[in-house]
Amino acid sequence: MKKFRLLLLTALFAPAAFAQSPRIAIIPEPVSLTTKPGQFILPKSISIEAPANAELKTTTAFLQKMLSTATGYNVSISNTSAAAAVRLQLNKTSNPTLGTEGYQINVSSNGAVLKANTPVGLFYAAQTLIQLLPPQIESVEKQSNVQWSLPFVDITDYPRFGWRGLMFDVARHFFTKEEVKHFIDDMVRYKYNLLHLHLADDEGWRIQINSLPKLTEVGAWNVKKEGYFGTFSPPTPDEPRTYGGFYTQDDIREIVQYAKERFVNVLPEIDMPAHCLAAIASYPELSCTEGADKYRVRSGEQIMDWSHGAPPIAMVDNVLCPANEKVYEFADKVMTELATLFPFEYIHVGGDEAPHNFWEKDPQIKTLMNREGLKTMDAVQGYFERRLEKIVASKGKKMIGWDEVLDAGVSKSTAIMSWRGVKNGIEAAKQGHDVVMTPTTYAYLDYMQADPVIESRIYASLRLNKTYEFDPVSEGVDAARIKGGQGNLWTEQVYNYRQVQYMLWPRAFALAEDFWSPKNKKNWDDFFARTEQHFARYNEAEKKYAPSVYDPIFTVTRGADSTVRIALETEVKGLDIYYSFDNSFPDRFYPKYTAPLTPPKDAAQLKVVTYRGKQQVGRINVMAAEEWKRRAGLKK
């Protein structure tokens, strides 16, 4: 891996023409950036001047750490300093252009001056300032032979959208309190301000609810499985249910405070009425189905049949029973405790992918339908959602849900997260709902980033350039109703935090720019040039990211004579593809791809690799003969 990183670093900085300058590579792209000749050399004793404001402590601590660790320099903080290298200033008169989160940076021979109307603006200014320094500033060890300098620039910057979110699914696999903090640290570097925590699902209940202790005593634990989620063998009774975990209420308070200090709101999600197997395993009376006391928290075995599309057919009833008053008592207890733990104005209630097949044969549901005049199962779910909305409102909160809740007749105070494309978000906005756009087509960060021959297999792909095309405001929609956008990281196939980073970055770079930067400044070639410089930063920080953007795109077709044709292309410009069919590992001295390939009759595999000039940038991708035949629709 270290050799690959060295090759990649060499490749990144050889063609300086790719970047807007050899050094300036800010993500997300600022509203305005003007360069001037010259640079400010950091003194070996750096003074940071900042107002005595409690909300600035995180910002000054961040700058102190970043400016001292890799440089080895002494960095001090003071309220006044005649020789300050970095000055943080709160505007005495608010600058209306900057708003709440905007900032200005001026770097000259006198040092760097950061200005904003608010502490959050200065926090984002600090993130940008660090990106002006060489990539080695990200190192966790002292670096030698680096000129620590800032280019002379004037920057004015502010966000396009107020809601710039990332969803972290901690239910499918549990991630520790410290890992959630790492997630927050990673996201704020790119000016995200909303952390959506998916806290409960079929695979685990992750938050302590004092009035319902079994949710964590039982619901937080399953059998550890590794492989491809959804294909695991059902656990046997003797397999230990010791895999998982949960956050105590003190943990949640600590996470919320940590986020607040970094100007991040935390949105809790408890998905209802479906995705509730962990809750039902803890309290079987929440189910309509007889025998629910035999249910166990899912460990990744198949429990849904998706072959007929959505909603799925449940093999195990993972849905709460809308006809049971105990369900609403349960929801009330959960929402009461969530409301005290999370100060954010919204609580997310899910509402997606509810199978109806168990409801359809339940006599309690039939009684409910007759009593309430409900004609369909969708109407039954609508009844549940409207009652849940009242419970949430009674706690002084507003409800937000996946776009399925739009069909439930909820009030306009409920916000909609549009995940099934953008069409439901457009419709929700037309009906007067606030909307967060988070469509699978652009924003699902659990999807594969390259071809399945090299990526961890999941049911769909989403490449970096597609993510960069995302615009939360679709044509014909009322822009005032679009609160912003969000990327979602579901973790069925994500087992550890290094893989979390791999799945997020660089696609979360693209989303950060989709949500922050002016639409008219977006440019793919320029963005990717800057992304490569941030790869160098991640190498220095030893953070993981996906190099999938360098891997080729395969298109397999079959001719009239059943001949297989394999076309290859690259996501970024300037790359050459080399290949082999002889089972050896290609490099740039192998045949260069120029036209679609026809595999030799007895070939067992195609191996391909990408280069930029003399430097390998892509990984070796291997497509077996069985795979190209399958894609071409041929029998093996």
Image (cartoon, rainbow, N blue to C red):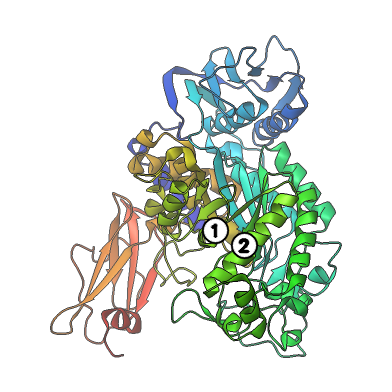
- Would residue 123 be found to the left or right of residue 591 on screen? right
Q: Which residue is mark 2?
A: 385
Q: Position of residue 357 (x, y in %)?
A: 55, 82
Q: Earlier in the sequence, mark 2 or mark 1?
A: 2
- Please tell me which residue lies in front, 569 or 286: 286
Dot 2: what SS?
helix
Residue 541's x, y, as percent? Answer: 60, 46
The location of residue 324, given as percent across then percent down, is: 72, 74
Determine whether 104 is above or below 337 in the image.
above
Query: Which quadrant holds residue 301?
Result: bottom right
In this picture, residue 618 sits left or right of residue 418: left
> In the image, is residue 341 above or below residue 15?
below
Front-lying residue, 315 or 478:
478
The quarter of the displayed image where residue 424 is located: bottom left
Q: In the rendered view, does 459 fall on the left or right side of 336?
A: left
Q: Amino acid at mark 2?
A: Glu
The residue positioned 65% from the left and 18% from the top of the image is 90
- Name the residue at 68% across, 81% down: 288
Q: Is residue 493 visible?
A: no
Examine the rendered structure and indicate whether residue 266 appears above or below residue 72: below
| Residue at position x 38%, y 56% in the image | 550
Which residue is at the far left?
Answer: 560
The one nearer the camera, 246 or 133, is 246
The alpha-carbon separation of the residues under discs 2 and 1 comes to: 8 Å
Q: Is residue 278 above or below residue 546?
A: below
Q: Is residue 407 visible?
A: yes
Give x and y (percent) for residue 40: 54, 19
Label 1's element? loop
Asked if residue 149 lies left or right of residue 220, the reply is: left
Q: Quadrant of residue 517?
A: top left
- Residue bearing mark 1: 409
Residue at left 55%, top 66%? 352
